[in-house]
Amino acid sequence: MKERILVMGASGMVGGELVPALRKKYGAENIIASDIREESEVFKGTGPFHTLDALDVAGTKTLVEKEEVSTIYMLAGLISAGGEKNPKLCWDLNMGSLRQVLDLAVEKKLKVFWPSSIAAFGPTTPRKGTPQKTVIEPTTIYGITKYAGELLCQYYNRRWGVDVRSLRYPGLISWKSEPGPGTTEYAVEIFYGALKEKKYTSPLSADTYLPMMYMDDAMAGTLQLMEAPGEKIKNRMSYNFSAISFSPVEIAAEIKKHIPDFKIDYASDHRQAIADSWPESIDDLEARRDWGWKHEYDLPKMTEMMLKNLREKLKISI
Ligand code: AKB
């Protein structure tokens, strides 16, 4: 059967990479992007786009029927720092959009991808090499929606056989779209600071380690998960998904190898407490074992790619 894919919440950082990757793989006309926001400049004009509120149950159903959609990637939602500013909206949007997509998946036999996050973990989780199954007591509203959402995915799979698949994304590092209001996003902002002003003030302390991944790896892993035969997907909550782990001082040192006069200073803000509640590194053995996940980008390779691509995008020659 021909894949017809709807990407909801497509104008954010993940959609900016996922939509072009899916269009390349399955043909532009088969990938329908939607968002309540404007169409992302990254993929504008490269295929179908519809303005859609991810909470609009009737509108989503009409679009799915009209476009004969077989798979939904549900990316809409508020992330950590943005969620703390508006906890009610974070809960309503993150849970409501997932729930309506899962209900539609039951009715229309759709396949679903939904991203969870390392934010599902909390301060009582072991912080180094966090295992797949462990204590999970998130303290941010975003993390609470992620853990509740994981359980909801598993419930819909067990109860109605919905083919829903999920990854616990670490901090994703991408040059194509602007970063959203998150915590790991400092590791994207730092490149803009380095190239535009040769300086950056980190909102996290020098030694705050967090799990991170270059976006090309994240997209490769996401497509690999979605294409894996159903019997290989042993986990219907969300897979631990990991590549690298570094601190602000380490990424700054890596950037300095390319821009020797780059300077970093530190002024921890509200994001520090969020980061301190999350793991430093993740054990993703089950993803590697079940469906063959492996990453390609380490810190030096990711830094090189970010600087090269952002220099071209921002037309900066340093
Ligand atoms: C955030 O920092 O809020 C996100 C995430 C790790 O889910 N990037």
Image (cartoon, rainbow, N blue to C red):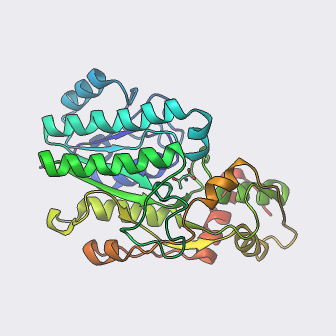
On screen, residue 18 above or below 4: below
* 215 sits left or right of 233 in the view: right
Q: Nearer the viewer, residue 137 or 18?
A: 137
Q: Position of residue 278 (x, y in %)?
A: 56, 61
Visible residue check, residue 182: yes
Measuring 17% from the left and 48% from the top, which residue is drawn there?
162
Q: Position of residue 180 (x, y in %)?
A: 59, 44
* 282 sits left or right of 293 in the view: right
Measuring 71% from the left and 59% from the top, which residue is drawn there?
191
Residue at the far top: name it: 58
Measuring 50% from the left and 45% from the top, which residue is drawn there?
142
Visible residue check, residue 184: no
Residue 318's quadrant in the figure? Answer: bottom right
Q: Position of residue 231 (x, y in %)?
A: 14, 66
Q: Nearer the viewer, residue 129 or 266?
A: 129
Marker count (numbered): 0
Q: Position of residue 184 (x, y in %)?
A: 61, 57
On screen, residue 118 above or below 108: below
